[in-house]
Image (tube, rainbow, N blue to C red):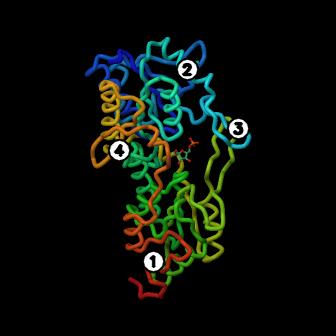
């Protein structure tokens, strides 16, 4: 069994990172007598003559369970992934060898990596080059394959749902259309779940391209039926059938491209098409900051303890995952092979449509009203 393991947090933060760190330290030290070394500022802390690391003992993780962010720091982009001019992703081997050399010098025998698909792909490369890793699935977007949930998602969902509740009362008072733009680069999990939980009238997600006419038709139908307000939740990665995703900036070698703007674009177009006063709220990083909810604390703690147990059982190159209410391990290669998208023929989409929610798809009417003007319910 390993004597010393490392722990690193990568990519955008998510509520529950500190709860995982706490569980890893408590389990490693308390149950298996291992030492834990925290790597600072994501994998970048492993580079250079002066690595940025610190030993984490149980006294260092006291009080961490409810704390947002990560005490280790994190980075979105760094030296471990390079993008060529033609957009290809390359993993420079000399950087990995430098980091692995430093890991050996620090006496670290295995690394627990808390990350989304990007950080777990880096973790997989460490393992390919001979350094054992265990992954822990983190992202508020909930788009990692092989796990039913990632930690952080349910907290983000709570925040988005509360925002929708609050937008309802002001929208209704002013007879307005209110658009809430939420996170979700490739997938619409936050928009879909919060839209159902928060009673949205329209949900726009990357998996179902929309038309402005279809959304406007829903707003007009609601007006006709006596509801003079409409609530729309849009994932930042949603796009029109005829358009592309909307970016705030396209990014460069140092910075990832940043999506954003679809909500405001819809605001202008819907005002033009319906003549109704429309407002847009971008929820942004409020979804990521602050305390994890009870479920995410529990999930993060289970993931952390199981990650250490996996090392103790001699496993490597696996990710802990939630499947059928149990924590299991799956090969990291499977988890990063594809993004977990919202199944457009799945139960949640049908439930949303059955309860009158529109996805703004071109033929949306046929789902609910069978193409007819139906009596208002
Ligand atoms: O991966 C989670 C996520 O929240 C995305 O939905 C979002 O596009 C991205 O991170 C934004 O991250 P940052 O502001 O750190 O670049």
Can you say which quadrant of the picture contains the C terminus?
A: bottom left
Q: Point out the tag, 2 or 4, that comes first from the N-terminus.
A: 2
Q: Of 2 and 54, which appears nearest the observer?
A: 2
Residue marked by disc 4: 293
| Mark 4: secondary structure | loop
- Residue 84's mark? 3
Q: Is residue 3 above or below residue 195?
A: above
Please name whichever residue, 259 or 277, is drawn nearer the observer in this view of the structure.
259
Point 53% across, 39% down: residue: 118
The answer for how far apart the CA atoms under marks 2 and 4 are is 34 Å
> How far across and how far down the image is residue 82, in percent?
65, 34
Q: Residues within 10 Å of mark 3 (few under 14, many from 20)?
A: few
Q: Quadrant of the N terminus?
A: top left
Side of 289 where 149 appears, left or right: left
In three-dimensional space, the C-alpha distance between marks 1 and 3, rounded to whole angstroms, equals 44 Å
Q: State the image coordinates of residue 213 (x, y, percent, origin top left).
A: 60, 76
Q: Is residue 248 above or below residue 76?
A: below
In the picture of the structure, the residue carrying the numbered disc 1 is: 367
Comparing marks 2 and 1, which lies closer to the viewer?
2
Please give the residue where the numbered disc 2 appears in the rendered image. Answer: 99
Q: Label 2, label 1: how many angstroms apart (C-alpha)?
A: 54 Å
Dots 2 and 4: beta carbons under 8 Å? no
Instruction: Mark 2: give few (<14), some (14-19) or many (20+) Cα within 10 Å.
Output: many
**Disc 2 vs disc 3: Cβ atoms closer than 8 Å?**
no
Camera-nearest label, 1 or 3: 3
């Amino acid at each position: 069994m390993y004597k010393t393991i490392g722990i690193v947090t990568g990519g955008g933060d998510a509520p529950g990172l500190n709860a995982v760190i706490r569980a890893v330290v408590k389990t490693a030290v308390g149950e298996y007598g291992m030492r834990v070394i925290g790597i600072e500022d994501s994998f970048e802390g492993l580079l250079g003559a002066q690595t940025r690391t610190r030993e984490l003992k149980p006294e260092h993780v006291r009080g961490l369970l409810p704390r947002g962010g990560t005490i280790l720091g994190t980075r979105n982009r760094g030296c471990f992934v390079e993008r060529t001019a033609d957009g290809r992703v390359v993993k420079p081997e000399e950087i990995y060898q430098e980091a692995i050399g430093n890991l050996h010098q620090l006496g670290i025998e295995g690394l627990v990596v808390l990350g989304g698909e990007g950080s777990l792909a880096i973790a997989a490369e460490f393992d390919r080059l001979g350094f054992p890793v265990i992954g822990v699935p983190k992202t508020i977007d909930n788009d990692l394959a092989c796990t039913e949930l990632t930690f952080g998602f349910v907290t983000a969902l709570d925040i988005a749902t509360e925002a929708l509740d609050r937008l309802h009362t002001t929208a209704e008072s002013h007879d307005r259309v209110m658009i809430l733009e939420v996170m979700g680069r490739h997938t619409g999990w936050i928009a879909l779940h919060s839209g159902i939980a928060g009673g949205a009238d329209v949900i726009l997600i990357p998996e179902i391209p929309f038309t402005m006419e279809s959304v406007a038709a829903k707003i007009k139908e609601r007006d006709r039926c006596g509801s003079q307000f409409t609530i729309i939740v849009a994932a930042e990665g949603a796009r029109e059938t005829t358009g592309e995703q909307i970016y705030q900036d396209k990014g460069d070698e140092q910075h990832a491209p940043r999506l954003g703007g679809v909500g405001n674009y819809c605001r202008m177009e819907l005002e033009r098409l319906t003549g109704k006063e429309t407002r847009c709220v971008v929820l942004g990083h409020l979804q990521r900051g602050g305390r994890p909810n009870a479920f995410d604390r529990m999930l993060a703690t289970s993931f952390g303890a199981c990650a250490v147990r996996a090392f103790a059982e001699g496993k490597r190159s696996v990710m802990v995952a939630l499947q059928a209410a149990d924590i299991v391990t799956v090969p990291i290669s499977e988890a990063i092979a594809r993004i977990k998208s919202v199944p457009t023929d799945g139960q949640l989409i049908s439930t949303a449509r059955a309860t009158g929610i529109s996805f703004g798809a071109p033929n949306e009417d046929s789902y609910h009203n069978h193409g007819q003007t139906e009596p208002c319910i």
